[in-house]
Each structure stands twice: as C-alpha cells, then as structure tokens.
Amino acid sequence: MPETPDWYMEFVAAVVARLPRDIDEAAARRWAGSPDQLEEALAAALVVAPVGAIDSASPFENDKAAEGMELVEDVAEPELIAAENVGEVQIFGDDEPFMVGEDVVERVRSMSPKLGQRHAEFLLAHPDMVPEAYNRYTLVFAGTLWRDSAGNHLVPCLHRSQGEWKIMFGILEMGMDNTDRMAVPVGEAPTAATAVPEAPAAPVSEVYNPNAPFQNDKTAEGMELLEDVSEPASFTVENLGETQVFGDDEPFMVGDDVVDRVRAMSPKLGQRHCEYLFARPEQIPEAYNRYTLVFAGTLWRDPAGNHLVPCLQRSRGEWKLIFGILEMGMDNTDRMATPV
C-alpha cells in the first residue's frame, strides 16, 4: 500500500476543520451511507463567501472631477470587502428632526469609520453582495466627499429603484432622513485568499446601439430627461460633424438665450453618440481637439431648473465626458456635434 503524501493529509485536515462542530451521530452515519448526501454536505461546508479587492489607485467609475467637482475626502480602506463586512448605521437618531444644510455636512464628516466610493462602485458591480435587508435604505458611502462649483457637498450613494441598485450622488445640504444609512465596515477583514477575481473588461462594441442604456444616467441624480435623440441609428465617426452655436459677431451669451438657441438647432447628436465616441477617443478627428463638442440632442433638467447637455472636452491630452449647464453660457470653442 503506497504511503499517503503529507500534502494530502494536510488537505484532509483542512477539510475536516471546515466541517460544522454540531454534527450528531445520526447525521454522520447518514452522510457516510449516502455518497450524494456526503458530497452535498461537504460542498456546503466548503463554500467561501466572495471577497472583493479594492484598488485605492484605480480611477473612479464615476469621476466627478470630469464635471468640475473637487475631491475633498476619499477613503479606500478596507482594501478587501465581503458581504458580511458591509454594515449600516443611522446618521440621525429617531428623536432628531429632519435636518438640512451645514448640520448634515458636519454630522457626516464627523462619523467614522466610513466606506467610500470605490466600495460603492464595487458593490454596484456585485449587487448580490449587498445584504437583502438593506433594500429599504439608501446607503451613503460618505468616505468619499465631493464639492461642486456652487459649494455643495456630494456623496456617492446606492439607492434601490425598480428592483435594482443604482448609484447616485446626493447633496448633503439637501438633508437626510432615517432611510439614509451610513455604509460602514464591520467585522474582521476578509483574507485575500478568497478574493473575487476581476472580470475581464467587456470588449467595446464596434456597432453603435441607439437603444443602449446611458452610461451616465442623470436620472440617478434626480434629473429629468427632457429630450433625447439617438438617430442616426447607423453611426460611425465618419458621421461626426460640428457647427458653431453662435456666430463670430455675436457676444458671449448666458441664460435662456443659450437654451433657446440650442433647442432650436437641428439636427443634433445625442448622449449615446457622445458615449460611443468617448469609448473610442482615437477615432475623434484631431481637428476637433480645440473644441468642446456639445451633444445637445440629449437635454437634462436638474432640480434647480438648470438645463444640462453631455459634452466631450479635451483636457490634459484626453477627452473627458462632462455635463455642461447651458445657462452658464457658450463661446465659439463650444461646437454643436451634428450628423453629417
């Protein structure tokens, strides 16, 4: 009889260590007498909860700097996260009134520990790791804090809508209630041995899809979609043209004059065309590098009544996707993206 190798004995010992300690004699004999039941019991005992690796150096999936916001704070710890490590705590007590303004900002900033935007984006990509008990809450990942040009403080949140988790950026000054819960790390940190491998990036489709969902859906931020153009349905970079919004002899304009001019222009390309090109920056003609390309076939309105349009803007040698507020004005470096 050949000698059993040490590695095999170590493996058996590791399996035995994973078995529950409350097995009774009847269950043990039943499993021993049924290979199928024994296989099922061992499979259950050896299941390891998935764990996600958080790369603090990775770019945000939703980088608000591209929209002109300032990153004030960012927490990427813990670097490994599992479902059992996601906790939630009340931000305001049941006996506290609904609060708005600086009181909310100060309370949120003072709380610790907190999970941040990279944790939120990881969980959004792995929604099965969000405990079902949290479905009734908006989870606030305030370890990452942004400030917009108006001085408002925004934090990434996961919000349940139509049976799915959505990411949105809530303005702290607008207030919170007890359905808003701070996402916090709890329990012992998981080990890297059980980390979920990163899925390979999906290949970029070479075909424009006029029915594709928006990659940057502003309804998740409380905005209203007023207009949307997805035609032409067959679109390639050869169909990209640009035209001036205001003539050389016209003064710099702001306010409703800009909104009226932009809405009156036709034809226009929309957000899906913008996102299609953003995924293929090398295909955008170099001659357009000096412009901000405005894809005003898609028009959003925010809670304050401002009108926003998706734009491609060149910054530090790269194309960035931003949402420009029409009321803030345009000049001759802003060019309407049109089909040709």
Image (tube, rainbow, N blue to C red):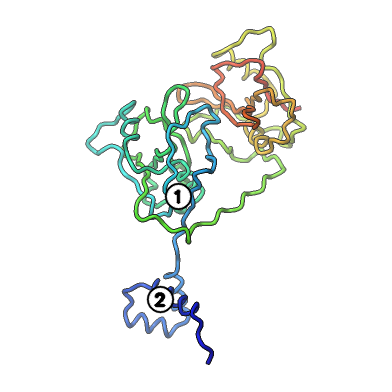
Q: Is residue 216 above or below residue 287?
A: below
Where does the image place residue 51, in percent across and percent down from the top left? Answer: 46, 56
| Viewer-side residue, 288 vs 129 | 288
Q: Is residue 40 above or below residue 102?
A: below
Where does the image place residue 163, in percent across and percent down from the top left? Answer: 46, 47
* Label 2 – label 1 distance at C-alpha: 30 Å
Give the side of residue 325 with respect to residue 230, left or right.
Answer: left
Visible residue check, residue 297: no
Residue at image point 45% right, 66% down: 47
| Viewer-side residue, 265 vs 333 | 333
Q: Is residue 2 above or below residue 119?
A: below
Give the side of residue 25 with respect to residue 193, left or right.
Answer: left
Identify the amino acid type marked 2.
Val
Residue at image point 52% right, 43% down: 57
In terms of secondary structure, where does tag 2 sit? helix
Circle 2 is placed at which residue position? 16
Q: Quadrant of residue 174?
A: top left
